[in-house]
Image: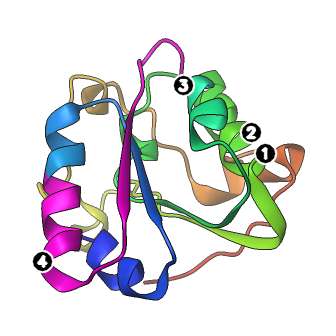
Amino acid sequence: MNAVQFAPRAGEFVGVDVTSASLRECERQVAAVCDTPFRGIHIGVDTPEQAIQAVGGPCDVFLSFCVFELIPTPEYGDRLLRIAFEPLSPGGVAFIQTKYDEGRFGTRPLRRCRPSPLAAQGCARRPEAVPAVVSGFRPVRSGL
């Protein structure tokens, strides 16, 4: 889980998810590696904007792994980018991982991410097609 790499360096780790089970697992894994307080925020799929108020203040770092390839539409992805940008502190950074299939072995979907019927719709977009600049982000492409 990616949280365990970041949580030890945080004053507080806030997890936001649409599934309670994912939040519980994240909390368990964070507690196993450090004493950083964990606060889980469960949001509805239809109302992701509620995360902004629930977080309740500025964030220095925003992390998103195995999310954007599961979203139902490009417009929903735009909403998520705006939600990610709004609570960032000045100088804050967002790490948003996107996985897309270019038809090569190395870019095929990995089964690590949680299953979703949305993933079958093929809504994950190439990084240069994500309108991050509109949301205030400066995109940086990584070949990781």
Q: Earlier in the sequence, mark 2 or mark 4?
A: 4
| Residue 38 in view (yes/no) | yes
- Asked whether disc 1 touches disc 4, contact meaning CB atoms under 8 Å apart, the reply is no
**28 vs 20: above or below:** below
Q: Which residues are magenta?
A: 25-48
Q: CA distance from mark 1 to mark 4?
A: 30 Å
- Asked whether disc 2 touches disc 1, contact meaning CB atoms under 8 Å apart, the reply is yes
Q: Amino acid at mark 2?
A: Arg
Q: Which residue is mark 1?
A: 86
Q: CA distance from mark 3 to mark 1?
A: 13 Å
Give the quarter of the figure containing the N terminus.
bottom left
Q: Which residue is mark 2?
A: 82
Q: Amino acid at mark 4?
A: Ala
Q: Residues within 10 Å of mark 3 (few under 14, many from 20)?
A: some
Residue at disc 1, secondary structure? loop
Q: Nearer the viewer, residue 63 or 41?
A: 41
